[in-house]
Structure formats: C-alpha cells, structure tokens
Amino acid sequence: YATVRSSQRNLDYNDDVNDNGVNGDGTDALLDEKTSQRIFELGKEQLLEIEMEEQKELMEGRERRRRKNKDDEDDEDDEDDDMDSTTGSLIGDLADDENLIQHDAGYVTVAENAPGLSAEEEAVVAAMMGGGKEERQTLADIIMAKIHEKKEQQRGGMGHGNDEDDGYTDIPEKVAEVYTDIGKILSRYTAGKLPKAFKVIPSLANWEEVLYLTRPDQWTPQAMFAATRIFASNLNPKMAQRFYNLVLLDAVRADILENHKLNYHYYRSLKKSVYKPAAFFKGILLPLCKSNCTLREAAIVASVLQRVSIPVHHSAVAIHKLAQLEYSGASS
C-alpha cells in the first residue's frame, strides 16, 4: 500500500471511479478503510438486531406456553388458595348466622340448640307430614338402572339395528375405558389437576352418558367441587340444571342423610352452583322442596342463599314457585 503522493492518487481515483463505484476500465472499485469499517459495523448492528428479535420471539413463546400451563393450573391453585382463605371467613359467617348453622371439623351442620331442629322435633315434624313417603331414588340407583338397561339392550337388541329411540348412543370401547378409569381417579381425588379428558365432557353431545361412566356417586367431595366448577362454567343453564339435579343434589342429600351434616366441599359446591341461578333453583331448590326434604336439609341449603348474591328476577320467580307448592315445613 503506497503512502507517497496520496493526494495525487486520490485525485486519480476520483477521476477513474464513476457514480456506480466502478472504475473507468470496468473493474470494481475498492472502498476505503473507513467506509469498509462503517459497513462492517452496520452489518454487525443488523445481525445483533436480528438476534435480539429472535431471542425476544423465543422468550415470548416461552411466556405464552408458561401462561397457558398456568391457566390450566389456575383452577387447582385457586381451589387450594380459596380453601385456606375462605375457610376462616366461612367459619366466621356460620358463627354469625343466628347460631343456626355451624362449622364442625370440615362439615357444615345445624346447631344442636337450633329451634325446631333437634332430633326429637324433626321426628315429630316427619310424623306430622306423613312417614309413608316413597323411598328416594339415588344417583347410584339411576346409574345402575342405566347400566342394566344398556346390558339388556346389548343382549336382546342384536336383531334390532334400527332401535334409535332408546336415548343411547354408542360409545367406543376405548372411550368408555378411559372415562371408567377417570372415575376411579375421582373416587380417591383430594387435590391437584383433573384429567384433561374430564374437562371436555361439557362439550360432548352425549355428556350425560359419558359422565355416568365416571360413577359420580363414588366421587369424593373434593372431586364434586372441582366438577361443579367446570360444569357451572361450561354448561348452559338447561344442561347445568341436569347436572345439579342428577349429580350434585343427590350427593348433598346423601351426605346429610349419612352424617347428619354436610361436608364443607359439598357446601362450597352448592355456593358455586349459584353461578347459574336459574339452574340452581330448577335443579336444586325446587326439586328439594317438592321431595319433602327434612328441615335439616332445608336449613343447610337455605344458608347457602344467605351468602351469595342472586339477581332479583330469579329470586322473585323462585319465591313465586315456592308459594305455589303444597305447604311443608321445609318449603316454608
């Protein structure tokens, strides 16, 4: 690289190079050191910007996946948090509820000294209202009847291929096996994630048949609460009414009948079911009153209504329907 007569060489260079950076003889012109360095710096900046954008997209993708996973766990996390945060407030509310309902080691029960709700008084009221009422059909009875009916249909319906009015749809064997296994999980469920296959039940056309495969009569109270949250949020009012009436109400009444008090998770399930007020009244409150429920059942369910906010028009319709029922201690 010559350093002598640089000014003359620069003049000659400027004369020989045209506007396109090409020498007069047609060959490419060489760029000076500063220009080359500037180009390299711009190139490095562009590469750095590209790398930063790619890194940003990668981080955003990870964040989206993390949020999605977090959303899937929100129900379970909220449930665990609510358990700790609301147990104390519920105990306080129950203590203030005119000494009628009490919290007893994970159960909601009627106070022993509550007027009209002692064991002797309940027996007297039951005798006055008539003790010959027909035996209540439980969810287990309904499920077993459907299972037997389905087996009879499979045995004797070989030659009746067009029998489509029986209300059943064919469930693939593998699907039935999956939901039967889910039922076994729910029978010992206490906390944590629910199987994803269970969460899609509300979106199925034959959701009732699939739900029966999980044997709701054998679910734990914790599983009932988790299921109520899913069905109350994803079913329309008419379908939610079916779930409340066939599954939740039966579980609540069976628990009160067996323990003379209601498990706290069932109590929370009742509170969650009011998310659909029309379904709650049609699927739980009115059927409960029509079935000659006990005063203990009525007091516990009524205490739920004292702790939730219900739209006025739903409450007005429910009161009107209750007033039209035949008189009983529970409906009054």
Image: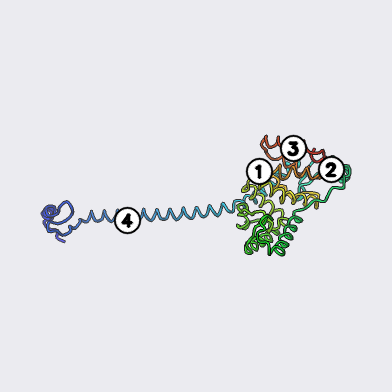
Q: Earlier in the sequence, mark 3 or mark 1?
A: 1
Q: Earlier in the sequence, mark 1 or mark 2?
A: 2
The residue tagged with tag 4: helix, strand or loop?
A: helix
Q: Quadrant of the N terminus?
A: bottom left
Residue at numbered disc 3: 321
Measuring from the top left, give residue 115's x and y in whole percent: 84, 39
Q: How far apart in space, not on screen, are marks 3 and 1 (Cα)? A: 18 Å
Measuring from the top left, give residue 269's x and y in whole percent: 69, 48
Q: Earlier in the sequence, mark 3 or mark 4?
A: 4
Q: Which dot, 4 or 1, sits closer to the camera?
A: 1
Q: Are marks 3 and 4 in contact (CB under 8 Å)?
A: no
Mark count = 4
Q: Residue at the spot x=72%, y=40% of the render?
A: 305
Q: How far apart in space, not on screen, are marks 4 and 2 (Cα)? A: 83 Å
The quarter of the displayed image where residue 271 is located:
top right
* 40 sits left or right of 29 in the view: right
Q: Look at label 4 and name its amino acid.
A: Lys
Between residue 267 and residue 236, name the one nearer to us: 236
Residue at numbered disc 1: 276
Q: How far apart in space, not on screen, are marks 4 and 1 (Cα)? A: 60 Å
Q: Are marks 4 and 2 in contact (CB under 8 Å)?
A: no
Residue at numbered disc 4: 44
Residue at numbered disc 2: 117
Q: Is residue 95 above or below residue 162?
A: above
Q: Look at label 1 and name its amino acid.
A: Lys
Q: How far apart in space, not on screen, are marks 3 and 2 (Cα)? A: 25 Å
Q: How far apart in space, not on screen, are marks 3 and 4 (Cα)? A: 77 Å
Q: Which dot, 4 or 2, sits closer to the camera?
A: 2
